Amino acid sequence: MENKNNTIHVEVAYALPDRQRIVALEVPDGCTVRSAAMQSGLDKQFPDLDLTTADLGIFGKSVSSPDSQALKSGERVEIYRPLIADPKEVRKQRAAKVKARKDGR
């Protein structure tokens, strides 16, 4: 089916632990990942969200060049929150606690 308007349908998603939003958009064919995020208006619904610097992905896979990667119709852009803790450090601390419990027996 040919798209006469040269637009594609995409979604942009953002979530906090207690609240999430998915916005459906019609964007020009060739629209970049970052541009779709900016057009979503989610930064107005989530005041602490900075779309100019946020990490972005498509269907759970991080995008290394969101300012130049073009979207395909049907894709979902995901806006990622910054990590609060380094996952490697958390695993190290958890392993140290388990080891300390075993050594304490």
Image (cartoon, rainbow, N blue to C red):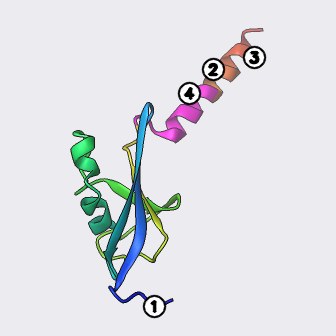
Q: Main secondary structure of the magenta part?
A: helix
For disc 3, the marked residue is 102
Which residue is drawn at the image coordinates 41% and 35% (left, top)?
A: 19
For disc 4, the marked residue is 93
Q: Nearer the viewer, residue 98 or 77?
A: 77
Residue 25: image quadrant is bottom left
Residue 30 percent coordinates (x, y): 33, 82
Which numbered disc flags the more N-terminal residue, 1 or 4?
1
- Please state the extent of the stretch shown in magenta in the rendering: 84-94
What type is the residue that disc 3 sits on? Lys
In the picture provided, is 104 more to the left or to the right than 76?
Answer: right
Residue 86 percent coordinates (x, y): 46, 39
In the picture provided, is 90 more to the left or to the right than 82?
Answer: right
Q: Secondary structure at mark 1?
A: loop
Q: Nearer the viewer, residue 15 or 65?
A: 15
Which residue is drawn at the image coordinates 51% and 35% (left, top)?
A: 89
Membership of 88 in magenta stretch? yes
- Contact (CB < 8 A) between labels 3 and 1? no
What is the C-alpha distance between the residues marked 3 and 4? 14 Å
Which numbered tag is attached to residue 97? 2
Mark 4: few, some, or many residues within 10 Å (few <14, many ≥20)?
Answer: few
Residue 100 percent coordinates (x, y): 66, 17
Q: Secondary structure at mark 4?
A: helix
What is the C-alpha distance between the residues marked 2 and 4? 6 Å
Closest to the camera, between mark 1 and mark 4, is: 1
Which numbered disc flags the more N-terminal residue, 2 or 1?
1
- Contact (CB < 8 A) between labels 2 and 4? yes
What type is the residue that disc 1 sits on? Glu
For disc 1, the marked residue is 2
